[in-house]
Image (tube, helix red, strand yellow):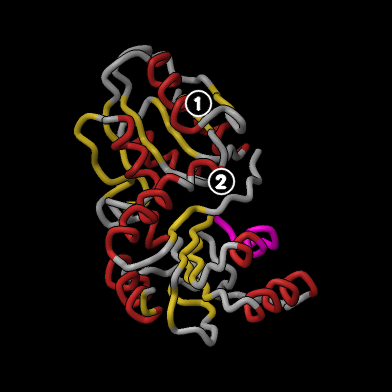
Amino acid sequence: MADLEAITEYLDSVFKPYLFDDIVLNGLQIKCANKQVKNVGLSVDVTGDILAKAGQKEVGLLISHHGLLTRELGRFDLVMSKRLNYIFTNNINIYACHLPMDAHFEFGHSHVLAKMLELADPKPFPNENIPYGCYGRWLGTAKELENKLDEILGTRAKKVFRFSKIVRNPKVAIVSGSGTAFLNDAFSLGINFFITGEPRYSGLVYAKDAQISVFCYGHYQTETLGLYELANHLKSKFDLNRVEVLHSFIDF
């Protein structure tokens, strides 16, 4: 078992949530009665089925990328009430890590994918002050890059918009989740291929004229990579029985 406070203080020291202006309420969102944790779960979202899996596996701390609570909570309806009731009944502490995870060079989904692709000369994207993504050069053909992405991320939510004429050694940018708002930054940096989660019409219109090919592999799917990295790290850092990523696939 591990002390809840020790884990959350460690996460705060790693991700520094207080530095980020985010719609998600990052850090420990919900604190229950239990102070000792034997099992940790990680997830993209906090949904009813994720909570059910956490309860079945006796998860004492659920670390979620999107979390449950935002800074603009709005109304609490029956859906939220059911979630909260299950959380407190089953003593599941909730820790959220949204933009602080995206920007992290070790656990950020985009940074993890860049390492898996072995991009040459990787740099933070769009810049060092807003490092939510990563960019570098793929040393190979466009087809080889696409095959590697298929291997890593699967093709369940894959959509490709081929606007670039570059076929070898393209300059590549990655922003997990919903990243097409950064396509103008990609154009400024001479990016040929842009890898993200979900397509947005306005972004694709811009990408077409900018001749940037856009590879979309699903918001959900692109935001699981950092969770696996963090899970493995926590296994080695704390005395825990089980640390695992819990899935509830919603993608398009």
Q: Disc 1, disc 2: CB below 8 Å?
A: no
Query: Residue drawn at (52%, 76%), measured in percent from left and top?
Result: 93
In this orientation, which residue lies closer to the viewer: 115 or 187?
115
Mark 1 vs mark 2: give the one in front: 2
Q: Which mark is residue 209?
A: 1
Q: Is residue 91 magenta?
A: no
Residue under numbered circle 2: 220
Left or right: 62 as drawn, with respect to 131: right
**Amino acid type indicated by mark 2:** Tyr
**In the rendered image, the vertical position of residue 93 relative to residue 170, given as above or below:** below
**Amino acid type indicated by mark 1:** Asp
In this orientation, which residue lies closer to the viewer: 103 or 239?
239
Query: Residue drawn at (56%, 74%), measured in percent from left and top?
Result: 92
Q: Is residue 46 magenta?
A: yes
Q: How crowded is the residue under tag 2: few (<14 C-alpha within 10 Å), some, or many (20+)?
A: many
- What range is drawn magenta here? 44-52
The CA distance from mark 1 to mark 2 is: 27 Å
**In the rendered image, the vertical position of residue 73 relative to residue 235, given as above or below:** below
Left or right: 11 as drawn, with respect to 128: right
Q: Which mark is residue 142?
A: none
Q: Quadrant of residue 12?
A: bottom left
Q: How crowded is the residue under tag 1: few (<14 C-alpha within 10 Å), some, or many (20+)?
A: few
